[in-house]
Image: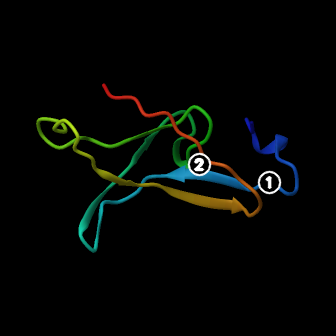
């Protein structure tokens, strides 16, 4: 796990999460994720929150939405992305 830029090896990418705008792709509306967290304008990292407001009334049982994520590539290299989805 990378907690700061200083722990990245030369072969590891450094990516920072960014706000993402909504978009329409053929046949789908894609909700952009909004970034909040401790890193501010530097972009998101460990401890950041990417969120999307659900449609009015929430999602019906079995329904789904498409979401888009954007990352700024600070340095190229190998990387992995993981997420934990929570509904509040």
Location of mark 2 (residue): 42
Report the side of 16 relative to 67 (left or right).
right
Residue at 49% x, 33% y: name it.
Answer: 84
Q: Position of residue 53 (x, y in %)?
A: 26, 41
Residue at 33% x, 28% y: name it.
Answer: 87
Label 1 environment density (alpha carbons within 10 Å; few <14, some 14–19, many ≥20): some
Residue 71, compared with residue 87, is above or below; it is below
Residue 40, compared with residue 31, is above or below; it is above
Q: Quadrant of residue 39?
A: top right
User: Which residue reaches farthest bottom?
Assistant: 26
For the image, the number of numbered tags is 2
Report the side of 22 relative to 70 (left or right).
left
Residue at 74% x, 36% y: name it.
Answer: 1
Q: Quadrant of the C terminus?
A: top left
Depth check, front residue: 65 or 62: 62
* Residue 12 tag number: 1
């Amino acid at each position: 796990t990378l907690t700061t830029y200083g722990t990245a090896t030369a072969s590891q990418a450094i990516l920072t999460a960014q706000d993402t705008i909504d978009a329409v792709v053929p046949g789908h509306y894609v909700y952009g994720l909004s970034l909040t967290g401790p890193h501010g304008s530097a972009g998101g990292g460990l401890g950041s929150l990417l969120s999307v407001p659900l449609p009015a009334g929430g999602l019906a049982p079995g329904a789904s939405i498409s979401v888009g994520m954007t990352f700024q590539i600070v340095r190229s290299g190998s990387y992995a992305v993981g997420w934990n989805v929570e509904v509040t």
